[in-house]
Amino acid sequence: MFVALLMTCPKTPKLDETTLVALRNAWGGGEVTWLAEGCAAEFPMEVIPDNRWTVWADLQALGIDLVVIPAEGRKKKMLLADMDSTMIQQECIDELADVAGVGARVKEITAKAMNGELDFEGALTERVGLLAGLPETVIAEVIDTRITLMPGGPALLATMKRDGAYCALVSGGFTAFTSRIAATLGFDENRANTLLVEEGKLTGKPGLPILGREAKVQAFHEISARLGLSADQVMAVGDGANDLGMLQLAGFGVALHAKPSVAAQCDIRINHGDLSALLYLQGYAQAEFA
């Protein structure tokens, strides 16, 4: 059995009974269950329809995300999450670069790297080089004044941890940021790159080795093995090309507001919802959120 799940942006809920029932009837689905009024609903069905992606595209135009997933094993025992533009709404290195006066150049490199157009390690090294001489104190200033959590993140972590899941933050960003975000949201561990500092200023060089796509895959294997979990018991979420490895390994690999080239390689694409969508994917109703 499978489940067809429809979701929309919680701030502007636009999922209506008419749209939902029409799709349910067309696909020969079962009884509709509302997980959040106007925001998330689902129905069971026996097969995945051939026109799945055509319907997905039609619903995207209406501001609705459609996901088709197996009905069994939905609740996951581990969350492996990217940080930048996933658990937070910004790219940390872009914010540092903006303060340093090289924002436009760094944002251009970041966008190409996240879309898979540039080698991640080379792109990171180049971007960090543009930050040379920036006072280390700017990091705390950026965190306090420029970084905001992705909506739905606190509920996602609190709910999964309440029910016994292990949560790890794995980022191509920097430990100075992941340590704060991990502590704020309640992640069990965090892995990221380091910014080298001398005499209170950034040297313009990252610590080696650089944590990129393969390091995220390694984290997936190491942590799940340590916990005795199968890949099917893991949910991974990210938005960039360096997340693809772990997204394709996980039982639920969620492309959240992802770059087009990344989303195209993932079956679970959340373009309108926020991180609360990861709870709906697991079958949680809004009333069950921690």
Image (cartoon, grey):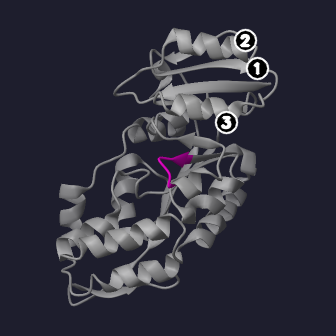
Instruction: State the separation of the CA atoms marked 2 and 3.
Output: 20 Å
Marked residue nearer the N-terminal end (1 or 2):
2
Q: Residue at x 48, y 13 (%)?
A: 16
Say which mark, if any, is on residue 30.
2
Q: Which residue is mark 1?
A: 45
In this rendering, would 179 be left or right of 99? right
Q: Residue at x 33, y 68 (%)?
A: 107
> Where's residue 87, x and y in %?
42, 50
> Where's residue 222, x and y in %?
67, 64
Q: Residues within 10 Å of mark 1 (few under 14, many from 20)?
A: many
Q: Tell me which segment is drawn in magenta.
A: 255-259
Say which mark, if any, is on residue 193.
none
Q: Quadrant of residue 6?
A: top right
Does the magenta portion include 258?
yes
> Where's residue 278, x and y in %?
54, 37
Is there a contact, CB below 8 Å, between mark 1 and mark 2?
A: yes
Q: Amino acid at mark 3?
A: Trp
Q: Pick whichever, 235 or 17, lies toward us.
A: 17
Q: Residue at x 43, y 38 (%)?
A: 274
Task: Look at the magenta stretch and give its main secondary structure.
Answer: loop
Does the magenta portion include 1?
no
Helix, strand or loop under label 2:
loop
Q: Amino acid at mark 1?
A: Met
Residue 269 seen from this side: yes
Q: How many marks?
A: 3
Instruction: State the separation of the CA atoms marked 1 and 2.
Output: 6 Å
Q: Residues within 10 Å of mark 2 (few under 14, many from 20)?
A: some
Q: Which residue is mark 3?
A: 53
- Please, is residue 74 above or below residue 186 in the view? above
